[in-house]
Amino acid sequence: MQLKPIISPEQAVEKIKPNDRVMIGGFMATGSPLNVINHLVDLGTGELNIICTDTGYADKGIGQLISSKQAKSVKASHIGLNPETGRQMNTGELEVELIPQGTLAERIRCGGAGMGGFLTKTGLGTMVEEGKQKVTVEGEEYLLEMPLTADVALIKASIVDKAGNCIFNKTTKNFNPLMATAAKLVIVEAEQVVEVGDVEADRFTLPGTFVDFIVAV
């Protein structure tokens, strides 16, 4: 069994480059890799294309990257808890694509599964359909939604063994496992790192196959 490198937060954020597509787990900062994000803010890497479920709060989690103007674009399901995201969107400083939450999850899942996209009725007749292909199946109209992938995924797990297998505590799971399947490079921030075999294999939600590096906090 291959053990995964355990690196520092400083080493982790050095792997993120300007213009990278970066998926970041969490929901309202719950389950977000806050330590890694803090170090990314300190490093100042900019021009990031962030994919997330929301932009958190202006002073916490993903919101800090917005406040420090390190994001070039954001794909998210809502931004209402962070007024700075809306301000930058309205002034043209930040490109924002608002995606229905179920659609966002499925686009990421498709990216991880190598699928070409999926059909959904969600967004028909709204601004969501703008610029998208419509497909008719048995007389019913659908939107064709395309998969989402990333250069890097930053995720957070409660327990990670040294082979990268992950356990997520309750709602901290949210988008984290999905994002790990859809990125070229996956960095997991672990609350606790344990030896291989310390945890029963059937307790793991995300196999270590998807993880490249572990940050122990």
Image (cartoon, rainbow, N blue to C red):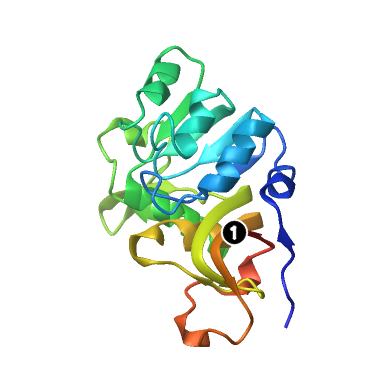
Residue 34 vs residue 134, the one in the foreground: 34
Which residue position holds label 1? 188
Quarter of the figure that contains the N terminus: bottom right
Query: Is 113 positioned to the left or the right of 186 in the image?
Result: left
Query: As displayed, is residue 106 above or below residue 73?
Result: below
Query: Is 154 positioned to the left or the right of 212 in the image?
Result: left
The image position of residue 49, as x and y in percent, is: 58, 35
Query: Is 90 positioned to the left or the right of 181 in the image?
Result: left
Query: As displayed, is residue 49 above or below residue 90?
Result: below
Q: How many marks?
A: 1
Residue 172 visible (yes or no): yes
Residue 179 vs residue 108, the one in the foreground: 179
| Amino acid bearing label 1 | Val
Quarter of the figure that contains the C terminus: bottom right
Mark 1: which secondary structure? Answer: strand
Residue 212 vs residue 156, the one in the foreground: 156
The image position of residue 128, as x and y in percent, is: 34, 35
Q: Residue at x 43, y 50 (%)?
A: 26
